[in-house]
Amino acid sequence: MNAPRISQTRRIVTDLPGPKSKALDARRTAAVAPGVSSVFPLYIDRAEGAILVDVDGNSLIDLGSGIAVVSVGHAAPTVVDAVQEQIARFAHTCFMVSPYEAYVTVCEELNARTPGDHEKRSALFNSGAEAVENAVKIARHVTGRDGVIAFDHAYHGRTNLTMALTAKNMPYRHRFGPFAPEVYRVAMSYPFRDPEGMTGAEAAARSIEQMERQVGVENAGCVLIEPIQGEGGFIDPAPGFLPAIAEWCTANGVLLIADEIQTGFCRTGDWFACDHEGVVPDLITTAKALAGGMPLAAVTGRAELMDEVHVGGLGGTYGGNPVSCVAALAAIGTMVDQDLAGAATKIGATIAERLTALRGSHRGIGDVRGRGAMMAMELVRPGTKDPDPDAAKRIVAACHRAGVITLSCGSFGNVLRLLPPLVIEPQLLDDGLGILADAVTAEL
Ligand code: PLZ
C-alpha cells in the first residue's frame, strides 16, 4: 500500500536535529564506522516528492535528491508500485543463472536513449563505481591498450581502480593506496579558473598535448570524462571542449567513455549531458537516477565493442537485480510521461535567476554555473578567486538548520550545489531558494 500523501511544504517542529534524531545519532556513534559520514544528522522516517520527513516529524526540503538519485521524486508512485509487485513475484535469481525480461528491457531502453543512433549493447551492475570499473575493463579488452586517461577534478568512485581515477586526496584516497596502475591525469576545462578567455578548443588542445606526451596514442585505451563534473565542483567545460576531445579520440582509436552517472537521465535538461553538444561517446556509464532510488548501474556501448568481450567475462551476483530493473523501467517511464528533461530546464532557469541575483549582492560568490537542475555557486574570498570552503560549510549548515538539504562539493570544498528532484513543485523550490538566500546573507 502506498504511504499517505505527504504535504509538499517545509514544516519545522523541533530544533534541528530534534531529540529522536539526537538519540539515533548517539546509537550510531557506538555502532557505525565513523569513516562513513553524514552531512547532517537528521534521521529520515518517510519521504515523498521533494519532502523528507525526519523521525521528529520535521518536513525538510530536499535540494540534493540523495546525490542526484531521486530525480523522479521520493516514493514516486510508479516506482513504488513496480517494486512492490516485483518483490512479491521474485526478488532475485541472478541474471547469469536464470534470466528475466526486465533486465533485457532496461538494456533496450538504455540502448535507445543514450547518445548516438548506432547499434548498442548494455550490461547492468550495482553501483556507479562498478560501472566505471567495467567500462575500463571493456575498453582495455577491446583496444589491447592499458592507458586510462582521466581529468583533474574528476570523481569516479571509491573502489581501488576508481579511487585511482578520482582526482581528490581527502577524503577519497588518503592512505588507501597503492592504486591501480596505468591511470593518467590531464587538465580539465574549468572556465572560472582557466586563463581569461580560454576557449574550449584551446583547453582541449592543452589536455591533448598532455595525453600525447604522458601516455602516447598507442598506449591510450580510453579517455574517461564526466561531461559536467559532479563531486569535483559542477565544472561545466567551455563549449567546444568535449567535441574536440571526442574528435581526438576517434582520430586515434582511443575509446571515449562518458561517465554520466551524475549528469544522466534528464538532470541537465537533456536526457544525457553529452546530448547538449551532440557528443557521441563509445561507452557510457549510468547509475543514480536510472532506477529512481534502487541500486542499479549500467555500461552501454557500441555493439561491435561490447560484442568483443568473451562470454562470461562480465557480470556479478546482483547486477541487474529484477527489483532494481522494474524500478528503472518505472522511473524512465515517468521521465518520459512527465517530460522531466523539460522540467529540469525550467528548474535550472529559476535557480540561475536566484543565484545570479545573489551573486550581484555578494562578492563572496565568485561563479554561478551549471546546466538544467544541476546548478552551483563557487564561493571565494571577496575580490579574489581564493576558495572559501568555510563559507560553503556555513551556508550548507544554515540551510540544514532551517530545514533545507543542500550539498557542498568541489576539489577545494567551496562549491554549493543544488540537485532538486525534477518533480519539485515551484512554490517548494521557491521556499528552499529563499532559505538559501537568507543563509547566504547571514553567512557571507
Ligand atoms: N561517477 C560521476 O558522481 C557518485 C559519490 C558520493 P557510486 N557520486 C557520489 C560519495 O562521496 O561516495 C559517482 C559520480 C560519478 C561515479 C560515481 C560513483 O558512483 O554509485 O557511488 O559508486
Image: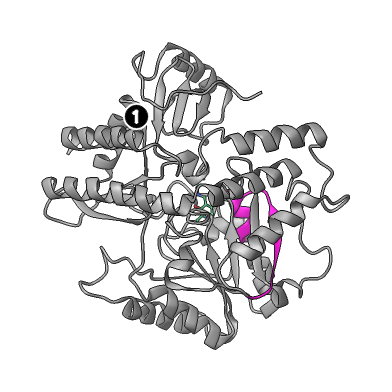
Specify whether tag 1 is near ligand 1 (CB below 8 Å): no
- Read off the residue under disc 1: 400
Q: Is residue 241 left or right of residue 327?
A: left
Look at the picture and state if 82 lies above or below 401. below
For the point 76% across and 75% down, the residue is: 308
Per the image, is 217 magenta?
A: no
Stretch of the chain drawn in magenta: 118-132
Above or below, 389 against 432 in this view is below
Q: Residue 323: percent from the left, percent from the top? A: 72, 40
Q: Quadrant of the N terminus?
A: top right
In the rendered image, the vertical position of residue 90 relative to residue 242, given as above or below: above
The residue at the point 14 percent across, 45 percent down is 362
Where residue 284 sits: x, y (%)?
A: 58, 65
Graded by Cα atoms within 10 Å as few (under 14), some (14 to 19) or many (20 or more), the crowding at tag 1 reads many
- Nearer to us in this view, 296 or 221: 296
- Quadrant housing the C terminus: top left
Mark 1 residue type:
His
- Near-viewer residue (389 or 327): 327
Can residue 121 be seen by looking at this rendering? yes
Q: Is residue 308 depicted above or below 313 in this figure?
A: below
In the structure shown, which secondary structural element does the residue marked by tag 1 occupy?
helix
